[in-house]
Amino acid sequence: MPVILNSDSEVVSSLEESNKPNHARRAPVLYGFAAFVSLIGLVDSIYLTVEHLSGRSVQCTIVRGCSEVLSSPYASIRGLPLALIGAIAYFAVFSLGTLAAFGYKSAARLLPIVVGIMFLTTLWLFYLQAFVIRAFCQFCLLSALVTLVLTVLVFLARRQQKSKLKLVL
Amino acid sequence: MKRALPFLIIAVVLVAAVLVAWNLKQSAVQAPIAAPTPSSSQNPSQSASPAKVAEPGADPPRAIGDAKAPVTLEEFGDFQCPPCGLLHPVLKTMEQEFGPRLRIVFREFPLVSVHQYAAVAARSAEAAGMQGKFWEMHDLLYENQKFWSNAFDVRPIFEGYATKIGLDLEQFKRDSSSEAVAQRILQDGKRGTSLGVKGTPTVFMNGSEVPFESLAPEKLRVLINNELTAKGR
């Protein structure tokens, strides 16, 4: 069992090799749950992408403002719908979450980076809705909620692994 | 097998995501409701008549241009819908470019569940129409959409527009809340629903739905020219 570790990869590696039965308890479940939650975001983003590309005002059932938000200049970056970028991001999270749940350490390392970027983007988009566009779109709010849950789950999963590290050391 | 399982799951989800997107796209893009026929193509209120379910809409329709024009664009619009506001200058450009060869019909399709002032804007335009100034009010509403959409109370603003275009203000107020105006909006809405309109703007050219992505000026110009060529004009 190593006492000095040089990098996170070695940590994860050592965990997997030396403590696999223990490691296989909570973190993979959290990653699996994150993958499942990301599916909600994926469906939401696909819907918004299709609506964005159709270009019409969409019916909002819970809050007003869908058409204002979706037709705002912030809904696309150089002609690429933001919702499409979101769909790709959620699919990436799903893929990484699934792989991490199956013990792929590089996926577990990459996941917090992707989710972190998504979280910061979500904060920015929430600010835009609240203070610039001054309208909220329920589908965008759902996406924000999903990203928030993903951030918490991935944070907990990483913490779980880190606490395992301490036990190993 | 266990090593392949996560990749298999990812592949399945990818295929499912593509299928979901495809299904949504298919349901969002309506097929042409009624194929244009040579005899019906000049009158928008009859152009979709081959479809059994098409309602006639308010009669007479709010139309600009020659009734015998070879091409008719029928727009189902909502004055508070931002994409409709973007389409407005495009249709204005087409109107100027094609002159007597193009007729434009506007149908009320206020998305009241989405837009707070869509109904009152539609009523105001129709009330102006009662005094023969529908298009003047129509233009003002679209040109100032961003301004009144965020207003606390739009009625004084719309009354200001009514005065500006020279309407009898008292008559305008009476007409705005009249049953006749409500019926016109209702009839247009029924026509839109019968044609499968779900969002705004939806535009039909001689009875065939124009895909939203083709409503950009350069694409719409090509479509109109093609239609004119087909009609030998």
Image: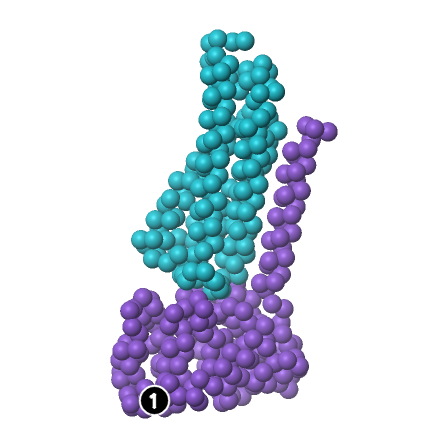
Chain colours: A cyan, B purple
Q: Quadrant of residue B211?
A: bottom right
Looking at the picture, how far across and down is residue B3, in whole percent?
68, 28
Chain under callout 1: B
Query: With B26 as the anchor, is A154 left or right in this view?
Result: left
Looking at the picture, how far across and down is residue A11, in whole percent?
51, 17
**Is disc 1 placed on a helix, strand or loop?**
helix
Name the residue located 48 percent from the left edge and 44 percent from the top edge.
A146
Tell me: residue A125, above or below residue B89: above
Locate the N terminus of chain A by quadrant. Answer: top right
Amino acid type, mark 1 = Arg
Name the residue carrying label 1. Answer: B174
Residue B135 visible: no
Disc count in the image?
Answer: 1
Q: Nearer the viewer, residue A54 or A106?
A: A106
Name the residue located 29 percent from the left edge and 72 percent from the top edge.
B153
Q: Nearer the viewer, residue A95 or B63?
A: A95
Tell me: residue B15, above or below residue B53: above
Looking at the picture, how far across and down is residue A157, in whole percent?
50, 29
Tell me: residue B203, above or below residue B182: above
Name the residue located 29 percent from the left edge and 69 percent from the top edge.
B152
Name the residue located 52 percent from the left edge and 65 percent from the top edge.
B212
